[in-house]
Image (spheres, rainbow, N blue to C red):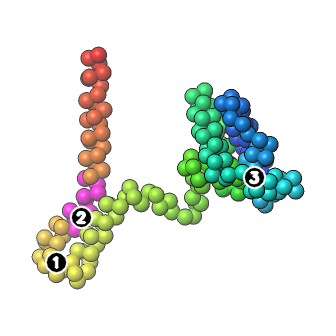
Amino acid sequence: MSSPSVVKAKRFLMNRIVDQAKRANVPLTEVETRMLGFSPGSASPAEHQAAAAFDRAYDKQKYETKVSQLFRDVYELDKSLGRAEVWEQSLDSLAQENIYLADIIRKSGLRQATVPWYLPDLRSLRQYFTAIIMVLAGIVVAFTPLGERLVPDPVLRTFVVLCFWLTPWIISKLRKGSGEEELGGAEPGAQEK
């Protein structure tokens, strides 16, 4: 059984897509409309019949492309009208649900399923990859026999380790500094106009 917020979000998104289809003069049959809200776990017998008819008579790829385009168009329209918050709430509610519309949204890259709080978000590792490598290199040089062989002098080894460990911090400061200069450089040009 779906929670009230999921039911409300599903109804909102389905209605917005159907409205956009009418506005764009894109035909959506009753079976296609029912498929938007289809969920295998909670479907009624009528919804299972509609899903069977859909599997027999429709091209799934074309349907998903059509729905994705309608979704993007109505999303951009509503965002421009200041309705982004309602959309975000609805999309968050459906992010983990097993509903065909949510699946289409995830496949098209418009919204990804949220990462549970107890799992790390591995996408952020890309951002910190250089820093992780530099810190690990510093650990190898400081605390392993390999590090002693690579840099036998203890003073020089300490200096090399500090360089490894400070490099991520220095890079972040340089990035912030160059970003501020670009912003600062844009302001005088804007004032001259």
Q: In this view, does 143 lie above or below 101?
A: below
Q: Which residue is at 65% across, 43% downward?
A: 67
Distance of mark 2 from mark 1, alpha carbons? Answer: 14 Å
Q: Which residue is at 25% across, 58% downward?
A: 167
**Span of residues in magenta:** 161-170
For disc 2, the neighbor class at 10 Å (few under 14, some 14 to 19, many from 20) is many
Q: Which residue is at 30% across, 50% downward?
A: 172
In the foreground, 142 or 66: 66
Pick whichever of labels 1 and 3 is earlier in the sequence. Answer: 3
Residue type at mark 3: give it: Ala
Residue 6 in sight in this render = no
Residue with the mark numbered 3: 57
The local secondary structure at tag 2 comes to helix
The local secondary structure at tag 3 comes to helix
Residue type at mark 1: give it: Leu
Q: Is residue 145 left or right of residue 27?
A: left
Residue 26 got which mark? none
Q: Which residue lies furthest to the front in this view?
A: 57
Residue 169 shown in magenta: yes
Q: In this view, does 23 lie above or below 2?
A: above
Residue 23 in sight in this render = yes
Mark 2 touches mark 1? (CB < 8 Å): no
Q: Is residue 193 left or right of residue 49?
A: left
For disc 1, the neighbor class at 10 Å (few under 14, some 14 to 19, many from 20) is few
Residue type at mark 2: give it: Phe
Residue with the mark numbered 1: 150
**Residue 132: x and y, percent?**
34, 64
Q: In this view, does 74 lie above or below 42?
A: above
Q: Which residue is at 71% across, 31% downward?
A: 22
**Residue 127: x and y, percent?**
38, 55
Give the mark count. 3
Distance of mark 3 from mark 2, alpha carbons? Answer: 62 Å
